[in-house]
Image (spheres, rainbow, N blue to C red):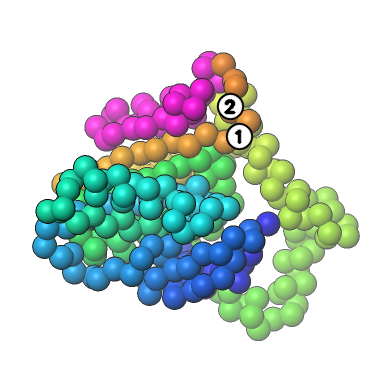
Amino acid sequence: PITYDIFDYDREKAFQLKKNYSGLFVEVPFATNSFGYRSPEIALEKPENTKRVLVLGDSISFGHKVMDNETYSYFLEETLSQNFGEDISIEIINTAAPANSPYQEYYDLERGLKFDPDAIILQLTLNDISDMPYVTVIDVQKHIDRILKERSALYLFLKDVASRIRFQDITGKNVSEKALQQEIDIARSMINDPDNPEVLKAWNMAFEWIQQMTDLAKERGIPFVLIATPIDFQLGREKQFAHPQRILQAFAVEEEIQFIDLLDILQ
């Protein structure tokens, strides 16, 4: 389960990793810099002879169950540093956080542009897409929800009752598990029933944000790389069931951006 004390409230994107934080996530230590990123401290202005890569993503890019020096951002920085040599410094800015969706990642990109990145990586997993119908994207609603939760016991009680009714759990003890299972069910439908109305709704919502990200990159002439990471139950399945990867690849072709399919590589 996600430990919510690693987050601060964010009015635009609902949550953000705490700044200058040092603690545990799923029993593994991690630290953030003064911007709330799981990256070394970084200057706002890019130094001379420096190349920067802005990483957007979910718990995969954040580094679920791995140490700070075991994230793929860490290894990417090492590899690029070796390839570019001593004359060019490489800085990977890892903005990813557990539970992120394209909605949060759009704001991470918008804010990350101030670091003047030379390339952008967006990593997506299936559950990032299936999460979209549950994302509230109206700032005022999010802000009101937070204020009411902090100040109204009645509001908290009504939210609890609503959750119990929605997930048909009178005791309220299994709401989190049932919500997670519902998310997994939609993710499975993306593979087994790609024309399911809930699946199509999730894709439409996700692409609204992904399109805005690619548009921002194009406006500034920054190369954009889309990485599709599979969910575990996709491994070992026939290629005909890789509907989500084909959808993302078609988008990448249309937008003329680089696409990396880790499902195909891992298979």
Q: Quadrant of the N terminus?
A: bottom right
Could you tell me residue 172's position as x and y percent? Answer: 83, 60
Is 267 situated left or right of 225 in this image? Answer: right
- Residue nearer the viewer, 90 or 107: 90
Q: Is residue 78 visible?
A: yes
CA–CA distance in space, label 2 to label 1: 6 Å
Could you tell me residue 167's position as x and y percent? Answer: 78, 51
- Residue nearer the viewer, 42 or 163: 42
Q: Of the residues shown, which amino acid type is indicated by label 1?
A: Asp
Identify the residue at horizontal 20%, vertical 59% (top origin): 116
Is 196 situated left or right of 175 in this image? Answer: left
Pointer 2: what residue?
235
Identify the residue at horizontal 48%, vertical 37% (top origin): 229
Pointer 1: what residue?
232
What's drawn in magenta, residue-wise? 239-267
Q: Are marks 2 and 1 in contact (CB under 8 Å)?
A: yes
Could you tell me residue 247's position as x and y percent? Answer: 43, 28
Magenta stretch encompasses residue 254:
yes
Assign a secondary structure to mark 2: loop
Count all numbered tags in the image, as a single digit.
2
What secondary structure prevails in the magenta region? helix
Q: In terms of image quadrants, where is residue 89?
A: bottom left
Q: In terms of image quadrants, where is residue 156?
A: bottom right
